[in-house]
Image: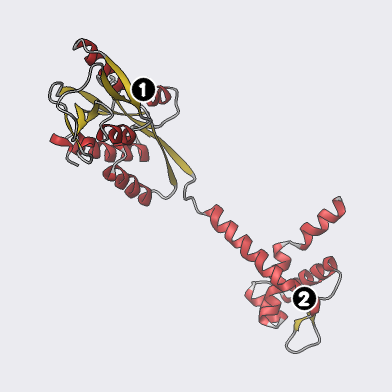
């Protein structure tokens, strides 16, 4: 097993294959040696080594110009493919594209067209960096950031933490379907995010302050699911004003607006590409915080 393996590795030595293909392409030992910057003696020795490993002649030396033997013709296609694969592998390993990563966590509705463009512009300037983006609920994202899972995170909370890089107010309001009835039944049906969601807790607290009966009629896994459920008339929900405009929903007048929540950006690093990306993301968030969520 060891002898056969050593034989295969030696036969596939790219130096030997390169000398062989150069002789075939140039139809001359002298020209092939010049193209590979070798002496004619060296290229002849490498061909002889390959022929010994193969067990048969590969070049008709007496022909003018020299040409491959039947065995040489059989090997030639494999040799070219192996050399092409080697060149491809060397190019791939020599290209730093995607060799480093920046891990980003943010709520789903923050990944809008403006943020995606920011990521795209950054990726074009820094081909060596791969952006690993995770969307999720703010409280889970915060926990994961604190445990070191993310380099940059954007989260929503009642108030920004003392170490945030930037924070902006997010207007939120109660919404119902654009075709909702004039009055809602008692108990009040609510459309909520999964447990541990910031909006979910605020909704329950408001309903209890109003001394209203309520129940969760629909729990969505993401913002789009929640908005579609509200649009379909399944119940009321508390939502970011910036996200509601694309759906057939309207503000629920009896509850109206809630106090704005904070959308805060955090980052461990203060210099280098991470800091550059943080600055660009901060610009997107500043534009997003303009009245009525204009981007």
Residue at image point 68% right, 72% down? 38
Q: Position of residue 266 (x, y in %)?
A: 32, 28
Secondary structure at numbered mark 2: helix
What is the C-alpha distance between the residues marked 2 and 1?
A: 67 Å
Q: Position of residue 179 (x, y in %)?
A: 19, 35
Can residue 157 be seen here? The reply is no
206 up-or-down from 107: above or below: above
Q: Which label is found at residue 72?
A: 2
Labels in figure, total:
2
Q: For mark 2, does the 10 Å Cα neighbourhood hold few (<14), some (14 to 19), or many (20 or more) residues?
A: many
Residue 191 at x, y = what percent?
A: 30, 26
User: Residue drawn at (23%, 30%), measured in percent from left and top?
Assistant: 240
Q: Which residue is mark 1?
A: 139
Question: x, y (%) of residue 198?
Answer: 30, 21
Q: Residue furthest bottom?
A: 64
Q: Quadrant of the C terminus?
A: top left
Query: Which mark is drawn over residue 224?
Result: none
């Amino acid at each position: 097993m060891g002898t056969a393996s050593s034989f295969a590795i030696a036969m596939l030595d790219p130096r030997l294959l390169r000398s062989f293909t150069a002789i075939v392409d140039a139809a001359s030992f002298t020209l092939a040696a010049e193209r590979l910057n070798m002496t004619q003696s060296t290229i002849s020795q490498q061909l002889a080594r390959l022929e010994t490993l193969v067990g048969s002649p590969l070049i008709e030396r007496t022909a003018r110009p020299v040409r491959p033997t039947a065995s040489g013709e059989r090997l030639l296609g494999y040799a070219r493919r192996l050399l092409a694969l080697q060149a491809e592998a060397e190019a791939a390993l020599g290209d730093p594209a995607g060799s480093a990563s920046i891990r980003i966590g943010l709520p789903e509705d923050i990944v809008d067209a403006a943020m995606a463009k920011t990521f795209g512009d950054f990726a074009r300037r820094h081909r060596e960096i791969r952006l690993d983006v995770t969307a999720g609920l703010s409280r889970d994202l915060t926990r994961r950031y604190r445990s070191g899972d993310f380099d940059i995170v954007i989260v929503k909370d009642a108030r920004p933490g003392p170490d945030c890089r930037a924070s902006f107010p997010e207007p939120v309001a109660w919404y119902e379907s654009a075709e909702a009835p004039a009055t809602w039944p008692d108990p009040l049906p609510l459309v909520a995010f999964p447990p541990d969601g910031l909006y979910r807790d605020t909704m329950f607290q408001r309903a209890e302050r109003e001394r209203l009966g309520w129940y969760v009629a629909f729990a969505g896994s993401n913002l789009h699911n929640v908005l579609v459920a509200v649009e379909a008339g399944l119940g009321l929900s508390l939502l970011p004003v910036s996200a509601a405009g694309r759906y057939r929903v309207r503000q629920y007048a009896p509850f109206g607006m809630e106090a704005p929540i904070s959308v805060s950006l955090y980052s461990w690093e203060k210099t280098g590409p991470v800091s550059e990306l943080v600055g660009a993301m901060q610009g997107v968030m500043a534009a997003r915080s303009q009245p009525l969520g204009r981007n």
